Amino acid sequence: GFLGGGFAVIAWFLFNEYVYLKNKDSTMVEAAGIGESGEKDFTWGELIDYRLEYFFSTSEFANVILLLGLSYLLVVVGAGLLVVGDSNDYGTISEAAWTAWTYVVDPGAQADAPSDFVPRTVSLGVTLGGLLVFALLIGIVGESIGEKLDDLKTGQSRVFESGHTLMLNWNDKSIAVIQQIALANESEGGGMMVVLSNLEKEEMEDRLQMAIDAKENPLDLMGTEVVFRKGNPILESDLKKVSA
């Protein structure tokens, strides 16, 4: 069933990773010219750390796989212990698995556990594991939202405009250029202007706001909107990002 299939997938994955690390160990030993009696300058723990770092840095769904894997292991181990330790209350593995799952997702479910030692102990352990999974979930969701907000702040998204004015790079004359473009757009009630520069988006926005708030000769956009994006003006990919 589902539990057996999931266990087979995890076993297959771990076996492949073991084979990979075993080959990597042999390759490193051979490259270093270490004989059978020689001492390696690395450990299996370091190899595993390297593999984990590679997996989490290259796989887009590494965090999701980690959460699903931990949840599955909690359910399988909890169900197995419940069946072995209290076969009277949990006659089938599917029934025990469902009970273990409720412990994972609902900390209060352990209050309904049988009063025997094994079910109470299993429910406590699985519930604590479920709290860890929930904490990881909150951290992953928060990190994803934070990364998205950072992308928005740094101007990584594409500009969807047409008929706009594009200014490449930023220097001490840029404010004056923006003012002239705003004057040209005044008769049409304003327009859209996009600035692409190697400077940080927030830095350019701050300079524009300082010019608008200046006490002497403040910048008047006259209805023109200015959008900033960070990028290299000579790269085709960055030019496409600003709809050039």
Image (tube, rainbow, N blue to C red):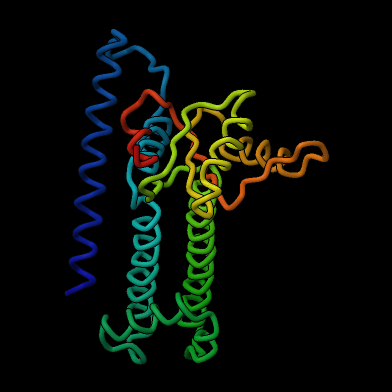
Q: Is residue 168 left or right of residue 97?
A: right
Which of the 4 image quarters holds residue 238? top left
Give the vertical position of 19 relative to 173 (above or below).
below
Question: At which x and y percent is residue 190?
Answer: 53, 51
Q: How many tags in the picture? A: 0
In the picture, the quarter occupied by the N terminus is bottom left
Residue at 25 percent of width and 31 percent of height? 22
Residue sticking out furthest to the front: 187
| Residue 211 image point, x, y percent | 71, 38
Q: Relative to 211, is 32 on the left or the right?
A: left
| On screen, residue 162 above or below 4 | above
Which residue occupies the extreme right position in the image? 215
Q: Residue drawn at (46%, 75%), measured in percent from left and top?
A: 122
Q: Quadrant of residue 236?
A: top left
Determine the residue positioned at 45% across, 75% down. Answer: 104
Q: Taking 18 as reference, is 116 above or below it?
A: below
In the depicted view, which residue is nearer to us: 140 or 68? Answer: 140
Residue beneath the point at 34% across and 56% down: 65
In the displayed structure, would residue 178 be above or below residue 110? above
Q: Position of residue 220 (x, y in %)?
A: 67, 45
Residue 188 % position (x, y): 49, 52
Q: Quadrant where the C terminus lies?
A: top left
**Quarter occupied by residue 17:** top left
Closer to the camera in the image, 188 or 200: 188
